[in-house]
Amino acid sequence: MKVLVINTGSSSLRYQLIDTEKDYVLAKGLCERIGIEGPFLKHVVEEDEILIECEMGTHRQALERVLETIIYTEPAPIKSLDEIDAIGHRIVHGGEYFTDAVLIDETVKEHIAECAKLAPLHNPSHLMAIEGCEELMPGKPQVAVFDTAFHQTMPPMAYMYAIPYEYYDKHKVRKYGFHGTSHKYVARRAAEMIGKPIEELKIITCHLGNGASVTAIKNGKSIDTSMGFTPLAGLVMGSRSGNIDPAIVSYIAENENITATEVTEILNKKSGLLAISGISNDIRDIEKAMDEGNERAKRAYDTFAYRVRLYIGQYSASLGGIDVLVFTAGIGENSARMRKKMVEGLEYIGIKIDDEKNQVHGVEADISADDSKVKTLVIPTNEELMIAEDTERIVKKELLKKQNK
Ligand code: ADP
């Protein structure tokens, strides 16, 4: 099946055309600066990369440019849009409505629109892309794959906040968790790599990119995760604070004479590694500064690693042990030094890595020491492939349902 995967951000649109039979990316690219000055489209087919500067005032226009580019730019991987079998959309927030990917219909669209309250920067652009596809490729099956769906298996004790119950009832304030597609993908790959059924494993997955989260997975299901009502919770991230004492918000607001909304903006954009180091949100810059003797860079680095280590400990308690630990995303896949730091002192729960095997970057690898009880794996994430496979699964399931009617 040829699946077009679409991933919209507030001012961007990423796409991949994937042949699911061959696990092969036929074309990929991204549109940036949609609706702002200087928009451009980067399109890649095999080794060929082109940059197109063109008018993209809305996500709908960006989508038109993408579809034209896919079929008219040589070497064209397909000659007509008819060759696309289905479209898979990454949707950030599905609230409590969706526990799995779904075929998009009017009700699904209404629910995505309702969840825009919970993800105001993302869900509206997802809807624009869905409606754009409906107009430009009428009748083509479209599937929504939610970042939140994988975590809907969490029990209430993991997702409830101990605040007045009416906030949950009225405003749906609870833990949702994010990065679900990535956690699901790497957990599944981990089970394949060690040759055991996922249903028999206790897995902790660490998705450590600019945004970062840890998930506890028991028998293939998420039972807890570090992000919360929003992606601000949990780990120290590039520019996000992660967990802090909630009383800090009003304290800073009063003392700096700013609003709570402004504090939240600071916690999202000017905190994390960037704030503690005073240098950068990028772990590479921090590692370099540390080597040059910068004390604040070291403090940021250690705090990041410590928080991840705490979550691994917490989640081994939630799971009642741990069989597999997975590192993924920019930092998890690439920084051998950070991986070593994060697992320091975790021998007591059976985690021991091999320094030599740990020297890998961006490839699948088992980095466990030979005598380690727990398997520690590096697995590059592939959210687009997971979305394409989920799309294929849902479309085929719906076809079967129709045939059996
Ligand atoms: P996101 O998708 O959340 O924006 P990524 O998964 O691309 O983030 O991860 C970005 C982070 O990964 C960078 O900020 C950087 O700290 C880290 N990173 C990327 N490449 C390397 C590398 N070669 N060595 C160490 N860290 C890296």
Image (cartoon, rainbow, N blue to C red):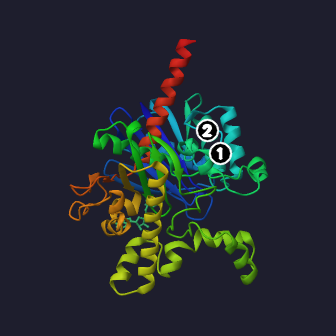
- Give the SS element for disc 1: loop
Report whether residue 82 is seen: no
Quarter location, residue 196 = top left
CB atoms at circles 1 and 2 under 8 Å apart?
Answer: yes
Left or right, residue 357 beside residue 331: left
| Residue found 36% across the figure and 87% down from its top | 293
Residue 341, x across and y down, in percent: 35, 69
Apparent side of residue 292 relative to residue 208 in the rendered image (left or right): left
**Horizontal relation, residue 186 to residue 136: left or right:** left
Q: Is residue 374 left or right of residue 383?
A: left
Kindly indicate the quadrant of the structure image that contains residue 368.
bottom left
Is 54 or 370 nearer to us in this picture?
A: 370
Quadrant assignment for the C terminus = top right
What is the distance, in whole Å, between disc 1 and disc 2 at their CAs? Answer: 7 Å
Residue drawn at point x = 45 percent, y = 43 percent: 218
| Few, some or many residues within 10 Å of mark 1 (<14, 14–19, 20+) | many
Where residue 361 sits in the image (x, y, percent)? 29, 60
Tag 1: amino acid: Gly
Q: Residue at x 70, y 78 (%)?
A: 252
Please name the residue that numbered disc 2 is placed on: 98
Place of residue 208 in the rendered image (x, y in percent of width and height, measured from the top left): 44, 60
Residue occupying the point 73% across, 58% down: 163
Task: Give percent across and percent down for residue 169.
Answer: 76, 47
Q: Quadrant of the N terminus?
A: top left
Q: Which residue carries the number 1 mark?
A: 95
Instruction: Report if the beta carbon of the residue with label 1 is closer than 8 angstroms to ligand 1.
Output: no
Q: In the image, what residue type sits under mark 2?
A: Phe
Question: 132 or 265, which lies in front?
Answer: 265
Which of the two residues, 140 or 304, is positioned nearer the viewer here?
304
Residue farthest along the top direction in this orientation: 405
